[in-house]
Image (cartoon, grey):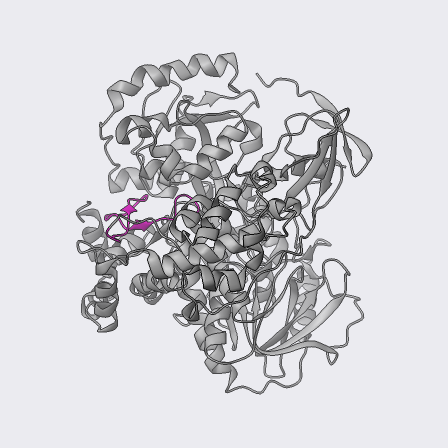
Amino acid sequence: MADAIRMIDLYVMGKQYTVPETLTIIEALEYAGYQIKRGCGCRAGFCGACATVYRIAGDFELKVGLACQTKVEPGMYLAQIPFFPGRKALFDLERIRPSVADFARLYPEVFRCLGCSSCTKVCPQDIDVMQYIAYLQRGDFARAADLSFDCVMCGLCVSRCPAHIVHYNAALTARRLYSRYLAPPDAFLKERVRAIEAGAFDHELQQLIDADKTRLQELYNNRDIE
Amino acid sequence: MVYTPHLQELMKKVEETRPSRVGVHYPRMTAAERQEVLRRFHPDFIEAGFRQLQVGVDKGSRVPLEMADILEAGSRLRGAALDLNRCAYDVDVLVIGGGGAGASAALEACAAGVSVMVATKLRFGDANTMMAQGGIQAADKPNDTPCIHYLDVVGGGGFYNVPELARALVMDAPLVIEWLESLGAMFDKKEDGTMNTIHGGGTSRKRMHAARDYTGAEIMRTLRDEVYNRGIKVVEFCPAVELLLDSSGRAAGAVLFNLETEEYLIARAKTVIIATGGSGRLHYQGFPTSNHYGATGDGLVLGYRAGAKTIFADSIQYHPTGGAYPPQLLGLLVTEKTRGLGGTPLNINGAQFVYHLETRDVESSAIIRECKERGLGVPLPTGSTAVWLDSPLIELTHGEGTIERQLPAMLRQFARFGVDIRKEPMLIYPTLHYQNGGLLIDEHGRSTVENLYVAGETAGGIHGRNRLMGNSLLDIVVFGRRAGRHAAARSGEVRPDGFSLEHVWNYEKELESTGSAGGRVAPILLPRYTHR
C-alpha cells in the first residue's frame, strides 16, 4: 500500500542535495546531513526557533517561513536564521501601567511605523502584525493582546521592518499589561487561594493521604463526574 | 485536499455516521476493562522494550532500553583537558535547563535575594513547556476542591503517586494560577473574569484552564520575559554534561559545554537544580514523539551518575492523539483539548470504539487495540495505520467557529499541510509524549543527593504511572517554584569545598566492570536524524 516517494533537488546554503518530497525544511536539512544546533526547536510550529529564508530557483522573491512547518519544493534555496538580535525593553510590571506614555517609554520605535505592512506580509502565523502595532499606538492594549496572541516570536517581522520595531517583544509587553491590569479578575480564584492558605483543605486531604489503596480505589471509581 | 482518493473514500463513512453521533455519550470503561486493555496493549507492558540496569544506585531496576543506553554510558569528559579550579561562573543557585520549571525556579530563587544563573542547551524557552497546548489544571471553581483534584491525580496515576507530592501539586495549583496571572499570563476568561475551564482525560471536574491552544507557550514566554526583566543571568547553548560534587558528595555545580565553541566551562554553585525536561527524543520502542528537539534525557544521566535515585523510570506516557498523516505531522501533538471539546476517535467504519476522555494510557491502549488486534484501523499511504479523530463533530456540537476560536494552533498546523480540520477529520495514532517517572524528589524538590534539586519532567513520583492532561504545566511551575525557594534558602547554609568529578570516574569504573558501557557516551545532547 505504501506509495513510492518522489525525490526532489534543492539547495542548502548553495549546495545541491536530493531529498524526499514529503519532508519539511528541517527534515530536509537533516536528510542532507546537517545536525542542527541553532535554528531548531519544538519542530511543531510553537517556538519560533526555525525562522527560515528561501527562494525558489527562477524566482526573484525571497520567501520566509518556519522550517518545521514548511514542506520542501523543488529548486528551493534554503538558509536558516541562527539568531536575531532584537531588543527587549526591561521593565518592572508593578511599576508600569497600560498607558500610551508608559508604553512609549519602553518601545518608542512602535510610533515610528511607516505603514508598509512588511511585518504582516511576512508573518508565518498570518497575524495582522501592522494592525496590532496600530492598536498599540492608540493604547488599545486589549485589542493588541488579542490580535497578537498567536505570535510565536520567530522574529521574521523584525527582520523586515524599516522602522526597527521589535513587534514580538512589544506585543508580549502589551499582553502582560492587559492581563495584569485590564482583564477582569476571577472573583472565586482569590477566595480559593485564601482558603488554601488558611488550611481549609488540610484535614480532608490528610485523610486521603492516610487512606489505604482499596479505600482510594473505591472513592475514585465512585466519584461523581461533572 | 491532501487525503488520497482511498482515504477520501474511507472518510465518507465518518461523514455518514456523524449525524447519528452528535450528543451521543459512548460508555466509559469499567475499572476491570481499563486494567485489561492496559495490560495487553500499553507499550509499558511489552517486556522486550525494557532491561534491568547493571550499574548505579538503582541497579536491578527496569527501564526502557533506550534509557538504559544513556544511563549506562561513559562521560563526555573522558580525556578532556579540564581544570576544575578555572571557574567560568560562580553563583549561589545554578539552574540547569531553560523551560518552564527552570524559569519558575530561577524567578523564585532570585526573589529570595540570592545569585542565580540559568544554563540551557538551546535557546531559553526551547522546551516541551512551549509546546503544551491544552491547559493547566487547578481546582478554583466552587464545585471543585484540591481534594477532588487529588483523587483524580492518584486515580489517574494508578494509585502509585507519592502522596506528599500529589498533595503539593493540587494545593499549590490555584496559587500558581494567581501567580501566573500576576505576571501577566493571559488565560481564557468570560466577560466577568470567570476562568473558562473544560474537562481533560480523567478529570471529574472542569478545571482545565487554557490560553487558546497556546497555553504552554503563553506561560513560557511570560516567565522568560520576567526572568530577563529581573536581570537573571541566562547562558544559552551551554548544556551541562556532568555535575560537580564537593568533597562530601554534595552537588556543587556543573561542567557546561558550549555547543558552538566546544569548550567546557566550570560553573560552581552552592545548590543545583536540574530542570532539563523529558526524553521523548530517545524514541522509546520506535515511537515518533511530540517532544521538543532537546528532550534527550540529559538530566537523568547527570543525576543518576551523581547517585540520585529514580522512580517509575519504566513508565512512559504515549499521548493517544499524535498526528499520523500527512507525514509532515507524524508524531506531532494533537491537543487533548480536541477531545475535551468533543472530538471523538473513530475506526475505519466511522464507529466510536472508546470513550473519548479516558486517561491517556487507557485511550492510547484502546487505539492500539483497534488497529493491531481488531484490524479496524485506517490504512495509510505511508504503510502504517491510524484512527480518525472526528474534529468536524466539534463544530456540529458547539457551533461553527468553535475550532477557529478554541483550536487556532491545530487549525493552522493542519491547514499548512492541506487538511481543514473543521471539515475533515484528523488521522491520529499514539505518540511518545511524556516521562511519567524520573529522579525521585520530595515536596521541596530535593533529590536523594544533597543540595541537588530536580523540577519538571525530569522529576518523578508526582504523577505515579500516568500523568493527567494539564498536570504537567502545573507540575513544572509548582515544583519549579518550590525547588527555587528551597535551593535559595539552602544556598545560604552551605560552603562547598573540594570540587570533584570523582563520582563520574567511579561510575565509569563500575560500568567497565559490568561490561555494559558498549562504547556509548551520554548525555547525547542532540538527537541524530541525519540520513548519511
Q: Is residue A6 visible?
A: yes
Secondary structure character of the magenta stretch overall: loop
Q: Kindly indicate the quadrant of the structure image that contains residue B407.
A: top left
- From the viewer's perspective, tell me whether residue B47 is left or right of residue A33: left
Q: Kindly indicate the quadrant of the structure image that contains residue B150.
A: bottom left
Number of marks in the image? 0
User: In the figure, B493 relative to A54: above or below?
Assistant: below
Q: Which residue is drawn at 41% across and 43% down?
A: B213
Judging depth in this view, the residue of A25 and A51 nearest the camera is A51
Give x and y (percent) for residue B75.
70, 63
- From the viewer's perspective, tell me whether residue A192 is left or right of residue B506: left
- From the viewer's perspective, tell me whether residue B470 is left or right of residue B55: left
Judging depth in this view, the residue of B404 and B375 nearest the camera is B404
Reply yes or no: does residue A166 show up in magenta: no
Q: Residue at x 50, y 58 (%)?
A: B61
Reply yes or no: does residue B211 show up in magenta: yes
Give x and y (percent) for residue A108.
56, 59
User: In the figure, B98 relative to B136: above or below?
Assistant: below
- From the viewer's perspective, tell me whether residue B351 is left or right of residue A223: right
User: In the figure, B367 relative to A35: above or below?
Assistant: above
Q: Residue furthest right?
A: A15
Give x and y (percent) for residue B345.
36, 29
> Magenta part of the protein: which range?
B192-214
Q: Is residue B449 visible?
A: no
Judging depth in this view, the residue of B375 and A18 nearest the camera is A18
**Quadrant into which the C terminus of chain B falls:** top right
Give x and y (percent) for residue B483.
45, 71
